[in-house]
Image (cartoon, rainbow, N blue to C red):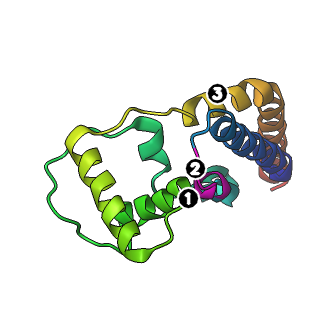
Amino acid sequence: MADILDRQLEVLGADIVNNMRRTLTTKRISASGNLRDSIQANVEPFRNNVSTLEISMAGYGPIVDEGRGKTRQKGISSRTTGFFADLKSWVRAKLGIRDKQKLEQVTYLVYRKINQRGFAPRPFIESSINQALNKNQDKIDDAAFRVLVNETDAALSKFYKR
């Protein structure tokens, strides 16, 4: 019976993903499309047969959404993973630099500038979630109520049949 609620959560997740992807595209936030393509929704089982909706995306998605302040970070901790690697992909897509040495140099300059000045937020997460919730709230409430009633009936039937 919880399948009813799971289906509504799947619909909600699909709407959230579509809203986020649309916002990234219309606001021209995603240069390479990697962030847009990385956004996924999954309904996962949790405790006591209650499911949860999980939205996942590339690790730098929340940084793009919230912005980043200046930091005192010196050097590069890793050129192959983390923020620098994500930034290198962005520089390659945005500026079209293919030469490896130039790509490293330009990426380092952008990295250093971000550390010195930070960058402004480009929000896309909260508005996308709120829009999808507003659209689906009644259906989710109905499904949750039906699950609650059915589970309660089943528990009471089991109890009184003793």
Q: Earlier in the sequence, mark 3 or mark 2?
A: 2
Q: What residue would you read off at disc 1?
A: 93
Q: Which mark is residue 130?
A: 3
- Comparing 121 with 137, the one in front is 121
Q: Is 35 part of what is drawn in magenta?
A: yes
SS category of the residue bearing label 1? helix
Tell me: residue 90, above or below residue 23: below
Can you tell which of label 1 and label 3 is closer to the viewer? Answer: 1
Q: Is 159 part of what is drawn in magenta?
A: no
Q: What residue would you read off at disc 2?
A: 31
How far across and down, in percent of the image, does residue 101 sit? Answer: 36, 74
Tell me: residue 59, above or below residue 118: below
SS category of the residue bearing label 3? helix
Mark 1 touching mark 2, by CB under 8 A?
yes
Q: Which mark is residue 42?
A: none
How far across and down, in percent of the image, does residue 52 sit? Answer: 64, 50
Q: Amino acid at mark 2?
A: Ala
Looking at the image, which residue is at 60% across and 28% down? 127
Q: Which quadrant holds residue 99?
A: bottom left
How far across and down, in percent of the image, does residue 1 sit? Answer: 86, 51
Magenta-colored span: 30-37
Q: Which quadrant holds residue 106?
A: bottom left
- Comparing 106 with 113, the one in front is 106
What is the spatial separation of the Cα atoms under label 1 and label 2, in whole angstroms? 6 Å
Tell me: residue 121, above or below residue 11: above
Q: Amino acid at mark 1?
A: Ala
Residue 150 seen from this side: yes
Residue 70 seen from this side: no
Q: Does residue 124 appear to the left or right of 15 in the view shown?
A: left
Q: Count the numbered circles shown.
A: 3
